[in-house]
């Protein structure tokens, strides 16, 4: 904005003055409307020692469960959330990353990597997790991806366990409300989707459409198939993304599953409340939780039927271990009484990825302050434009296998595109990718007069397994996170092959037309290696190690004889009673795609297990049709 040479009298009369003043009033009012009808906080009305039928810890997957369990009118359900209502930055899609370093996130960091993250600050990487209603679904990238049957084969342990693909597909569809007209108007595509669920899935393509088209063409020139729907039977190919953004606002598990039922009399949501541990009776039955309320007051709440932990992959193992469920040795070292000796925190998996930096010249111009002011006004007026889309990015994805022809993809490819001189490049590099100053400076320099594209390649099904552990006796301490990226050499073999294949995108006619240049990241230890050789790509993978924020598996579902299993196929914790885990930590293996849809599916699946287990013998009524 320019400074005015004279003081400006704001006109509030005359037809032009009135129109402009009305606009300003409208914009101010519009900002106040960017909120959601979050459920009331019941913590003030509850008393110490109060009883419920079910206690759910955490409102990510927990929001889905809270909805389904409170459908039973006779059940009193308590949902405990450590965070509070999501802020405006969560609702407005383009501001998602502003939540990562805020009170709405747990700012977790991994331990220093020996063979990865060499170019990261202190050789560690940033793992934010959501701390708000909706959990991580309130801070995430909003992509809705389901994966394909092969992703869930290892989850199906035996006949009749309810984890076969046809059953899972129905549970995916149960939550989903597909509204993208392109899908709805095509009967073949439509039949793959749910249309009556709570979680709205829409198109995401509102910005950088030209770049999205060019990327799509380039992948087609590389031989990839165009897919009308990346949530169809296979992901191998290239296509447009869909996700949880509707009418310019984020759809989270809280907006979808909690807000519409906030008036249910049998559901009690308490916010700003931290669960330290689960209480057990002499028969090892989970009876209650010890919490700290917002002003530091300790209380206990009790569950007649069950306690369900939905704290997410990092926090669930913490809660379990502080409650005496975990590796015996570690618990004893910390003087925690062992109730069940289980491999909690092991089996950690994540989608590791790195950016391939490419400069482009399509003639795109820098977006200055004026551009972003107009974008803000556009968003306030009708919730469209760059702020209405996730990270202001071209929303297409590609998936390929190396060699071609496998049933499941080896890598998922997404993209970050920046017009010249984008200030966000530096912020993202330092604060999110967590790379060191020298690497970030190279990115900024490349972007100073050219467009910069990060082709982000992530490994779909890693073999490497990491581990999460508690650090001290104190329950609020951040845990020790060892992701152990690339510790299994099969991962690096596949990844290097994929990086070589994907980087060939610069040779396509479409990329040549954009004057694409593959950039070499300078880093001591990689500089002497031949550019684009296997050794160079391996060095890059171990240097600019990044990830897709998808940790899973730390309370693995498995059979009783599986030494890695923490919960059974009905998600009940082994060795104790009345306790389940329902979140991303139960995944035995990570699906090839983004995982939030699978987390909601797990919660839907679990809700029916719980209803089956508790409604059989009783006369309690379900108010909504079950699956
Ligand atoms: C930056 C980012 C981008 C992502 N992008 C995508 C994407 O585009 N698409 C996709 O599919 N997936 C994405 N993901 C992953 C996905 O969002 C998560 O895997 C998923 O939401 C996890 O759900 P959850 O229920 O397992 O855990 P969470 O959603 O993390 O829920 C756990 C909840 O439990 C609460 N809690 C934890 N401990 C306690 C305690 N002791 N007391 C009380 N409450 C507690 C937390 O505050 C939190 O609300 C992304 C993740 C991140 C971080």
Image (cartoon, rainbow, N blue to C red):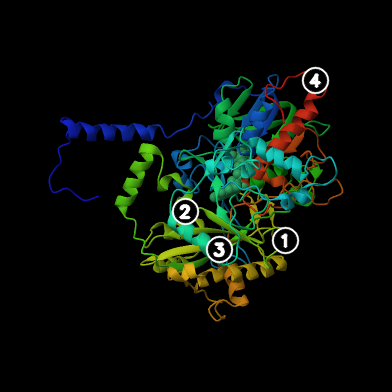
Q: Is 349 rendered above or below residue 31? A: below
Q: Is mark 2 within 8 Å of ligand 1?
A: no
Q: Is residue 495 left or right of residue 452?
A: right
Mark 2 crowdedness (10 Å alpha carbons): few <14, some 14-19, many ≥20: many
Count of numbered labels shown in the rendering: 4
What residue sits right under mark 1 in the picture? 463
Q: Which element carries disc 4, helix, strand or loop?
A: loop
What residue sits right under mark 3 in the picture? 219
Q: Is mark 4 within 8 Å of ligand 1?
A: no
Which mark sits nearer the N-terminus, 3 or 2? 3
What residue sits right under mark 2 in the picture? 393
- Can see residue 324? no
Q: CA distance from mark 1 to mark 4?
A: 45 Å
Q: CA distance from mark 3 to mark 4?
A: 57 Å
Which mark sits nearer the N-terminus, 2 or 4? 2
Marks 3 & 2, CB-CB < 8 Å contact: no
What residue sits right under mark 4 in the picture? 618
Q: Which element carries disc 2, helix, strand or loop?
A: loop
Q: CA distance from mark 3 to mark 2?
A: 17 Å
Name the residue at 37% across, 66% down: 448
Q: Quadrant of the C terminus?
A: top right
Horizontal and vertical percent position of residue 551: 64, 51
Which mark sits nearer the N-terminus, 1 or 4? 1
Horizontal and vertical percent position of residue 575: 83, 40
């Amino acid at each position: 904005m320019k400074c005015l040479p004279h003081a400006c009298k704001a006109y509030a009369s005359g037809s032009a003055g009135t129109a402009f003043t009305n606009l300003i009033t409208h914009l101010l009012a519009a900002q106040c409307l960017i909120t959601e009808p979050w459920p009331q906080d019941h913590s003030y009305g509850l008393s110490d020692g109060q009883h419920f039928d079910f206690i759910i810890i955490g409102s990510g997957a927990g929001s889905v469960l809270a909805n389904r369990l409170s459908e039973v009118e006779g059940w009193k359900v308590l949902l405990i959330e450590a965070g509070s209502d999501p802020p405006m930055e969560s609702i407005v899609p383009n501001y998602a990353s502003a939540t990562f370093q805020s009170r709405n996130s747990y700012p977790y960091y991994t331990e220093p990597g020996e063979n990865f993250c060499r170019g990261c600050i202190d050789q560690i990487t940033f793992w934010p997790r959501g701390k708000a209603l909706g959990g991580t679904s309130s801070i995430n990238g909003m992509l809705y991806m389901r994966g394909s049957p092969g992703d869930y084969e290892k989850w199906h342990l035996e006949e009749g366990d309810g984890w076969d693909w046809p059953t899972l597909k129905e549970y995916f569809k149960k939550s989903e409300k597909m509204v993208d007209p392109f899908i709805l108007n095509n009967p073949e595509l439509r039949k793959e989707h749910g249309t009556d669920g709570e979680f709205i899935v829409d198109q995401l393509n509102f910005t950088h459409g030209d770049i999205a088209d060019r990327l799509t063409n380039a992948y087609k020139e590389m031989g990839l198939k165009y897919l009308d729907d990346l949530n169809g039977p296979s992901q191998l190919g290239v296509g447009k993304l869909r996700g949880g953004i509707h009418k310019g606002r984020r759809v989270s598990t809280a907006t979808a599953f909690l807000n519409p039922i906030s008036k249910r009399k049998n559901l009690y949501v308490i916010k700003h409340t931290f669960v330290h541990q689960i209480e057990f009776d002499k028969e090892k039955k989970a009876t209650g939780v010890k919490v700290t309320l917002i002003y530091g007051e300790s209380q206990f709440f009790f569950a007649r039927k069950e306690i369900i932990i939905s704290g997410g992959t990092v926090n669930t193992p913490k809660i379990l271990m502080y409650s005496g469920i975990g590796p015996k040795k570690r618990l004893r070292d910390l003087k925690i009484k062992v109730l069940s000796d289980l491999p909690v925190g092991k089996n950690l998996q994540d989608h590791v990825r790195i950016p391939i930096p490419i400069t482009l010249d399509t003639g795109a111009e820098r977006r200055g302050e004026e551009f972003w002011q107009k974008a803000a006004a556009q968003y306030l007026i009708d919730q469209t434009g760059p702020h209405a889309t996730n990270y202001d990015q071209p929303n297409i994805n590609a998936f390929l296998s190396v060699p071609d022809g496998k049933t499941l993809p080896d890598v998922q490819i997404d993209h970050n595109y920046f017009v010249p001189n984008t200030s966000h490049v530096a912020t993202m590099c330092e604060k999110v990718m967590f790379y060191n100053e020298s690497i970030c400076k190279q990115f900024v320099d490349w972007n100073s007069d050219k467009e910069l594209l990060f082709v982000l390649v992530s490994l779909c099904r890693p073999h490497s397994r990491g581990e999460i552990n508690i650090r001290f006796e104190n329950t609020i301490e951040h845990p020790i996170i060892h992701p152990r990226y690339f510790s299994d050499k099969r991962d690096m073999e596949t990844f290097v092959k994929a990086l070589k294949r994907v980087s060939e995108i610069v040779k396509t006619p479409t990329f040549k037309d954009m004057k694409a240049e593959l950039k070499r990241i300078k880093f001591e230890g990689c500089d002497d290696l031949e550019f684009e050789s296997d050794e160079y790509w391996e060095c890059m993978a171990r240097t600019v190690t990044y990830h897709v924020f998808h940790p899973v598996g730390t309370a693995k579902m498995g059979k009783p004889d599986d030494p890695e299993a923490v919960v059974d196929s009905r998600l009940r914790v082994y060795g104790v009673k009345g306790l389940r885990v329902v979140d991303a930590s139960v995944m035995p293996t990570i699906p090839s795609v983004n995982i939030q849809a699978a987390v909601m599916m797990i919660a839907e699946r679990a809700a029916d297990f719980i209803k089956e287990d508790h409604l059989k013998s009783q006369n309690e009524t379900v108010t909504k049709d079950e699956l």
